[in-house]
Image (cartoon, rainbow, N blue to C red):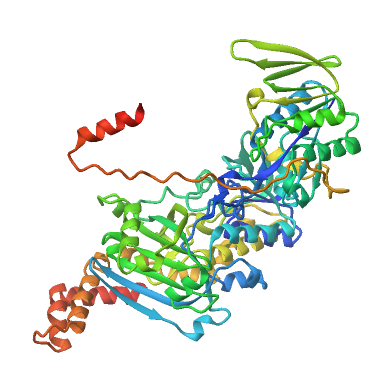
Amino acid sequence: MKIVVAVKVVADDQDIFVSGDRSLDYSKARQIISTYDTNAIEAAAQLAADNDGTVVAISASTTKADDTKVKKDILSRGIDELFMVADDSLETADSYATAQVLKGIVDANASDYDLILCGDGSADLYAGQVDVQLAAALDVPVINEVTGLKVEGDKVVVERTLEDEVEEIEVPLPAVISVSPNVATPRIPGMREILAAGKKPSSVEGLAGALETKVEVEDIKAPEMTPRKNEIFAEGDIDAFAAAVAEALK
Amino acid sequence: MADFDAIVIGAGCAGNVAAYTLASAGKAVLVVERGNYAGAKNMTGGRIYTHSLAKVFPDYQDAPLQRKITHERISLMSPDSNFTVDYSARELEEAGNESYSVLRGPFDQWLAEKAENAGAEYIYGIAVEDLIIENGKVSGIIAFGDEITADVVILADGVNSLLTSKAGLSKKAPAINQVAVGAKETIELPAEVIESRFLCNPGEGSSWLFAGDCSNGIVGGAFIYANQDSVSVGIVATMSEVLKQDIPVYQMLENFKQRPEIAPLIRDGKTVEYSGHVVPEGGLHMMPEIVGDGVLVAGDAAMLCMNLGYTVRGMDLAVASGQIAGEAAIKALDAGDTSKAGLAQYKTMLDNSFVMRDMKLYESAPEFLETSPMMFRGVPEMLRDIMTPLFKNNGEPRQHVMQIAMPVVKKMGLFKLAKFAMKAVKSL
């Protein structure tokens, strides 16, 4: 069984700062695997281990992602091989464009796939659209918000946890499935896995051809901070303070 | 057959340099660092004397060093006064003598990259839990159930090295009077603002050490280092004394920043980093055994650090000890004997280097600072009581310097002061 998992590489949100003009400062942020994609990677690795399969990771990223540490991190999580397209034009890629690039990677390197897994949404845009658009581009079925999955012959049986029941759906393969974070807890790669990751095959290519986007980004700004009200109560005036708190809680 | 020739634990100054030295000689080296990148867990005041770095990397000028230190400032701070000496000398700026302010995040990554380019392998984000010890010989490391073996293990895992005691090399945990606790803020300011506030040319900076009221009058001090686009401001105080205080170290730092002498230096700056760390200050007496069967200890883990009050060193010692540990390991590996006897030359080589020569020379410095409370509460006030009348003109009758100074000195005790001065010149 051949499983493909789509991985986005993003700036670590811990180190993105908001500048005075509400623009975002990425200069201190390192590149990391988008958080929910680590769950998808784990689900893929477990599925492959249980079904004697292989997992390849695919990624459409900017050239910043072409970083030994990031690639090693991906490959130390039970992934057999990594195919990355790294091009700075992807900085402004929307879900459509990303899906097209991912389709290109799949067609060129993993066209014999059985299953493609995606994370719940990316840590930066969280559009949750790439899975659907990738499936459309590949013309295969897609199902999202999956909380459990197992392979049965030439189909997968997935679970979707709804408000008061768990839905079980059979999906014929090949298919694209996006998984919720609770589908699997990401592993902490061990020393052996990290060492092995350095020796696994990975390829990075630039983007062939122009990027077609459907969404135009006008501006990216942090939300405006609401100024504090600065209501100061005189010492001892606890009743007025309590009344104000009660009012605010209403 | 072991997995690696050598495993280095810790990607700081000592560890990276040891790894670089080994890898450059064609040895298979693995570095395991618990932070997510080199320097993630490291903290320094920070200033590095570059003489030992230059020996390892002739191109050390390309390292992300901050500013060349051209002003040495030392202050004695009483609760309401501050006496400062500002010294600059061309000789201190010459190659071989010079020092730089440094931020460990970028600097340690540069070192790690050097080692990696030389062929060392790196594992980040893993804290080594234990050592594999076979028949008394350290033969590898253990983390999360994974075991990796090597002919020699170099412990460069910093001041809180648990592995040194697992290797049976440290006598016991350092006493609370042998370690200091430090808190530091990195405050961002534009380069030209730093240059005008600290009176420096572009690319040049200052080191500024304070003793006295900044640590609430206990053994310790404050520091300010001018970096390229930030200043490092911090407090270091001996742990045993901190425990007796009613104000915690972070409050000391806050109070220090509020001082009228300090506030204008950091005004409108943005705090971008806040960190705390333990500093080994016991000197020679707290050093563990640095050679064991299959194992060497370098850098802070070997407690190679000296605080003389006017000079604080650690990184140049770490770099040199890392290099020497690497060289000793290469010799032992080539001779096919990484037992304690085979590695023993590390100690000999270190003893013959400036590292141990200086550690021994300043052997009694920690004890001097610890047993001289007047240095931190007494002398700063005495200076104030002499200096203030010198500069005070308010129409009241003035006195000669001798008349001002003698009563103040006598109040402190002439004999006590003389004894203090003698002890100071002997141990520092």
Q: Position of residue B30 (x, y in %)?
A: 69, 50
Q: Position of residue A120 (x, y in %)?
A: 67, 29
Q: In which quarter of the image is the C terminus of chain A?
A: top left
For this rendering, which residue is in front, B324 or B387? Answer: B387
Quadrant for residue B22, please give it: bottom right
- For the point 55% across and 71% down, the residue is B352
For this rendering, which residue is in front, B394 or A196? Answer: B394
Q: Give the farthest residue toward the left.
A: B397
* Left or right of residue B164, residue A60 in this image: right
Q: Is residue B134 visible?
A: no
* Left or right of residue B282, residue B61 in this image: right
Question: Is residue B255 depicted above or below B165 in this figure?
Answer: below
For this rendering, which residue is in front, A181 or B341? Answer: A181
Q: Position of residue B151 (x, y in %)?
A: 68, 49
Q: In which quarter of the image is the N terminus of chain A?
A: top right
* Left or right of residue B413, residue B126 in this image: right
Quadrant for residue A59, please give it: top right
For this rendering, which residue is in front, B205 or A62? Answer: A62
Q: Where is residue B105 in the image (x, y as percent from the top left)?
A: 57, 57
Question: Is residue B373 depicted above or below B160 in this figure?
Answer: below
Q: Is residue B381 visible?
A: yes
- Count of all numbered marks drawn on residues in the image: 0
- For the point 47% across and 45% down, the residue is A225
